[in-house]
Image: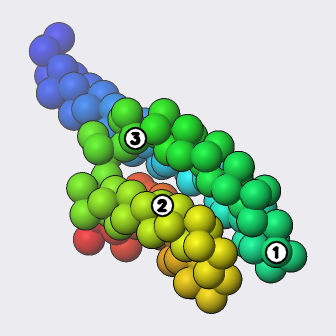
Amino acid sequence: MKKDFLVPLTLFLIALAIVLLGWGNYRLLDRDSRLLLESVKTMRQAVENGGWDNAKKTLDEAEQKWKKANGYWPMLVHHEEIDRIEECLTKLKSYLEHHDKAESMAELYSLGYFLRHIPQKEAFILRNIL
């Protein structure tokens, strides 16, 4: 009789662990994404106003934030998504160096999209599970 509750209890604990890990992963990705999106917003404003040095400085800061996040994001996110972000950062560096406003803005919008998209895609919600 005492062992009858072990299977349901074990299944409940496993389900709870899965939900908590999913929630924790989402929170981690969302936090990092928001930090990087703040840098993207600052760079957009700098490029709009012709502040190329400020935009480059902000990009350097964003790359440092990305290096920290990139230490564990590969365990949580598909590598294609990470490659897209790194490609955007690389292109953006070149565009800012050459003061190319149109290309810089296009790349900033792409980078912003990818950074917003990843936490939404990895969220532990029903539509992502099914």
Q: Residue furthest bottom?
A: 102
Q: Which residue is mark 3?
A: 70
Q: Position of residue 101 (x, y in %)?
A: 67, 83
Q: Is residue 3 above or below residue 115?
A: above
Q: Quadrant of residue 112?
A: bottom right
Q: Which residue is mark 2?
A: 89
Mark 3 and mark 2 lie on one chain; the one further toward the N terminus is 3
Q: Which residue is mark 1?
A: 50
Q: Residue at x 59, y 73 (%)?
A: 98
Q: Position of residue 88 (x, y in %)?
A: 45, 67
Mark 2 and mark 1 lie on one chain; the one further toward the N terminus is 1
Side of 53 where 66 appears, left or right: left
| Crowding near the residue tagged with mark 2, few <14, some 14–19, many ≥20 C-alpha atoms within 10 Å | many
Tell me if residue 31 can be seen: no
What amino acid is labelled 3 in the image? Asn
Q: Quadrant of residue 3?
A: top left
51 or 61: nearer the viewer:
51
As helix, strand or loop, the secondary structure at mark 1 comes to loop
Mark 2–mark 1 contact, CB under 8 Å? no
What amino acid is labelled 2 in the image? Leu
Side of 49 where 96 appears, left or right: left
